[in-house]
Image: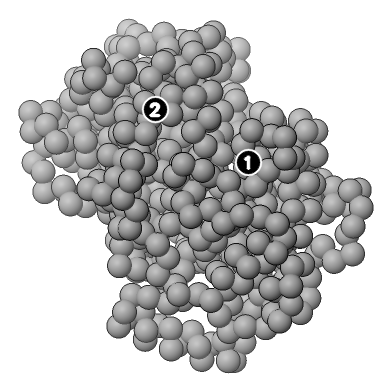
């Protein structure tokens, strides 16, 4: 057994941050365990590489949900990064934080220290924004945030169409007002992806007190009585252990942090006994409260070589773009595909936006796993920001190598489908605006769907995740909460969960930036509890 002060499981958006921050103290020994590889290849660093890493399983866990009753029994693909950087190494690099009221709601629900005013300093601490300089943004943090490097004229087409449809421009989704349409800022620097690993971990790998073990798959938390003492993991065919004198920190993500707790005997006692697992702490909330952004995509084939596609002229353009990227680090290869979007209200009386749009400069269908992805076209995603549906992560069996059972229970609350129908109509209104007339040629999948019944049928047949699962190790002070407001697992000692699974409710936006914020705040809980609120 190797001994450390802190053992962190999962080198993703949160785990890299915690490992980096804790190892700033040269007197503590930190170990980070990551099941995947280093994430330093071109497919990670070149932004457009995501079109290969999302559909493919080689640096991606490639999970699937259980059959979804409200989606015609379909099993939905659930990509998660399996590499240092985690899903920040394969995501669309969009930097959004959610709405201020989301965090105020966390605090009001019994989580002191998590209001917007209290989390904003951690967002700013993390951020190195290349352009924005105001009270909402940081300039000196580890995580680069910049404007798009693609120079794509379709941005303006989308913005013009949205304005023609009656929607305002939002100059900064993370500023004073989230509502409106705009071009997303991205976690890039000089046209390259900056994952959490590249931002927080790679500059500090030479620290003698930081051990980063890749290819190390955690199997369970080790205990002495009620005190967590380390992690059992498999690496290179061997089962090994890493001891933790101070704390074990689970940052394995919304699907695998609860799985590790369950494998370690923390969860619903009856379910654990069913799998032959000794119950260490009866905590029925482990794996519950799963939430995700279900998303419908409206797709048009279109005329424009600015839209990614594999026609003969499109391939010639792509070869020129490769040469341009090598020279300038700009253009099509710097694309995050979902380059623009917005936050809109489906009802003018709502206090904040309830749907989000992602405008893609490509045909995006079934996560890019079909030949239709090669056509020239554009796509407009719409998702319900604060779903009422709640699902659960459970064990398939007691074998650590077996994927967990993932049941997001999409649309199990009928209110979510009602909002998605309204969001579909808003998105279509933008795509039907005059600005798109010179480009559109064919509406795919949804042409002719006009009635609410038609739209509901389309959603049930074609809706997919847009990759924002949270909530399965919920933070709170009630009986069903998994962690307290300092992210300690209830009922045991020296064990925390630090990742998006602790969110009580899904925030109104993309989840990478909030996961980084959670980890920044958690590092202060661990190092300086009196200063972390």
Residue at 25 percent across and 46 percent down: it is 141
Rendered image: mark on residue 117: 2
Q: Quadrant of the N terminus?
A: top left
The answer to which quarter of the image holds residue 13 is top left
Badge 1 is on which residue? 353
Compared with residue 328, is residue 117 higher up or lower down, i.e. above or below?
above
On the rendered structure, is 309 left or right of 473? right
151, 371: nearer the viewer: 151
Residue 111 visible in rendering: yes
Residue 33 visible here: no
Q: Position of residue 177 (x, y in %)?
A: 51, 43
Image-quadrant location for residue 522: top left
Whole-percent x, y for residue 132 in the image: 34, 53
**Badge 2: residue crowd in 10 Å (few <14, some 14–19, many ≥20):** few
Marker count (numbered): 2
- Which residue is located at x 20 percent, y 23 percent? 527
Front position in the image: 434 or 330: 434
Given residues 257 and 48, the one toward you in this image is 48
The label on residue 242 is: none
Which residue is depicted at the point 53% across and 87% down?
315
Q: Position of residue 449 (x, y in %)?
A: 88, 59
Image quarter of the C terminus = top left
Q: Is residue 175 left or right of residue 453?
A: left
Colour scheme shown: one colour
Q: Are marks 1 and 2 in contact (CB under 8 Å)?
A: no
Q: Secondary structure at mark 1?
A: loop
* Mark sitting earlier along the chain (1/2): 2
């Amino acid at each position: 057994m190797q001994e450390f002060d802190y053992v962190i499981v999962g080198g993703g958006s949160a785990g890299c941050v915690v490992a980096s921050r804790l190892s700033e103290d040269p007197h503590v020994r930190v170990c980070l365990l990551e099941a995947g590889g280093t994430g330093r290849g071109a497919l990670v660093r070149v932004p457009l590489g995501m079109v290969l890493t999302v559909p493919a399983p080689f640096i991606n866990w490639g999970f699937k949900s259980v059959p979804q009753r409200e989606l015609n029994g379909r099993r939905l693909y659930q990509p998660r990064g399996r590499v240092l950087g985690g899903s920040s190494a394969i995501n669309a690099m969009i930097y959004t934080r959610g709405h201020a009221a989301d965090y105020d709601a966390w605090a009001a629900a019994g989580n002191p220290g998590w209001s917007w005013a209290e989390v904003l300093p951690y967002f700013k601490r993390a951020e190195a924004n290349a352009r924005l300089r105001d009270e909402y943004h940081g300039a000196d943090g580890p995580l680069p945030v910049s404007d798009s490097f693609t120079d794509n004229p379709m941005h303006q087409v989308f913005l013009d169409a949205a304005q023609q449809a009656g929607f305002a421009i939002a100059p900064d989704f993370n500023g004073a007002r989230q509502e409106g349409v705009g071009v997303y800022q991205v976690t890039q620097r000089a046209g390259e992806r900056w994952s959490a690993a590249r931002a927080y971990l790679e500059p500090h790998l030479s620290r003698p007190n930081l051990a980063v073990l890749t290819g190390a798959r955690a199997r369970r938390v080790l205990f002495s009585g009620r005190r967590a003492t380390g992690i059992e993991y498999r690496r290179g065919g061997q089962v090994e252990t890493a001891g933790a004198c101070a704390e074990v920190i689970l940052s394995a993500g919304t699907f695998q942090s609860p799985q590790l707790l369950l494998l370690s005997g923390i969860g619903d006692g009856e379910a654990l006994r069913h799998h032959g697992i000794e119950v260490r702490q009866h905590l029925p909330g482990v794996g519950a409260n799963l939430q995700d952004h279900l998303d419908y995509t409206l797709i048009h084939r279109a005329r424009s070589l600015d839209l990614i596609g594999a026609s003969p002229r499109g391939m010639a353009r792509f070869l020129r773009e490769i040469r341009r990227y090598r020279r300038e680090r700009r253009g099509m290869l710097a694309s995050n595909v979902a380059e623009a979007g917005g936050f809109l209200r489906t009802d003018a009386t709502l206090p904040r936006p309830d749907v989000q749009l992602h405008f893609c400069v490509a045909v995006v269908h079934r996560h890019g796993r079909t030949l239709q992805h090669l056509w020239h076209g554009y796509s407009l995603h719409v998702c319900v920001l604060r779903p009422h549906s709640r699902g659960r992560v459970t064990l398939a069996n007691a074998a650590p190598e077996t994927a967990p059972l993932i049941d997001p229970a999409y649309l199990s609350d009928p209110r979510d489908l009602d909002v998605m129908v309204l969001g579909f109509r808003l998105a279509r209104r933008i795509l039907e605006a005059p600005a798109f007339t010179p480009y559109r040629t064919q509406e795919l999948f949804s042409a002719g769907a006009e009635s609410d019944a038609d739209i509901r049928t389309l959603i049930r047949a074609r809706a997919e995740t847009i990759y924002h699962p949270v909530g399965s190790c919920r933070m709170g002070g009630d009986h069903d909460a998994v962690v307290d407001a300092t992210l300690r697992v209830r009922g045991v000692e020296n064990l925390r969960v630090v990742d998006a699974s602790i969110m009580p409710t899904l925030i109104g936006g993309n989840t990478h930036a909030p996961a980084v914020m959670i980890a920044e705040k958690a590092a202060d809980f661990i190092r300086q509890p009196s200063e972390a609120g």
